[in-house]
Image (tube, grey):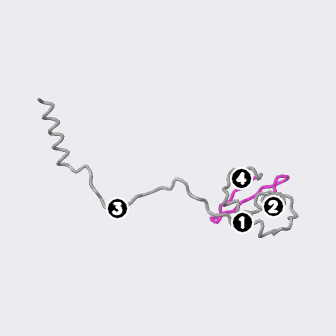
Amino acid sequence: MVQESSSNRAGEELKDEKHMEIVPDDEVAINDIPLATKPPIIVDWKIIKKGKMGYIQIIRADRSSRRYSSMIKMLQNINREDLEILWKLVKAKHGNTRPEEAYERVLWGDLKVMFEPEM
């Protein structure tokens, strides 16, 4: 008997209290945090030589940059869209002529094979 009266009281308390409120969508503000943000687009590139090593430096629109010691490392950290933009920048600088610099020639050659394979 005691159990029934306590459950009745709990039911009455739930009815009296407001545990849920329906709010129209226009009044709800959600602070969202994007799970993944797209990095800014590539705006420039440079070949940097340090001793015998050469690096490809990718410069983005927000002036952040990253250096890659090889094409394989760059491909692991760059998406297709960025790669297409990089090819357009390299092509705009050199056109279809083969660059003189060894590291630029490697970058130009690798990108040319990816985007303009000979058939």
Q: Nearer the viewer, mark 1 or mark 3?
A: 3
* Magenta range: 48-68
**Counting other residues with Cα less than 10 Å from the Cα at mark 3, is it few (<14), some (14-19), or many (20 or more)?**
few
Q: Residue 46 or 26: which is nearer the viewer?
A: 26
Q: Secondary structure at mark 3?
A: helix
Alpha-carbon span between mark 1 and mark 3:
44 Å
Inter-mark Cα distance, 2 to 4:
14 Å
Which residue, given by chain and number where applicable, does mark 3 sit on?
Answer: 25
Q: Is residue 114 magenta?
A: no
From the top left corner, tell me how far across and down residue 115 is, in percent: 76, 60
Location of the N terminus (image quadrant): top left
Residue 67 magenta-drawn?
A: yes
Residue tagged 2: 108
Q: Is residue 92 left or right of residue 40?
A: right
Q: Which residue is mark 1?
A: 44
How far is disc 2 from disc 1 in space, using C-alphas? 14 Å
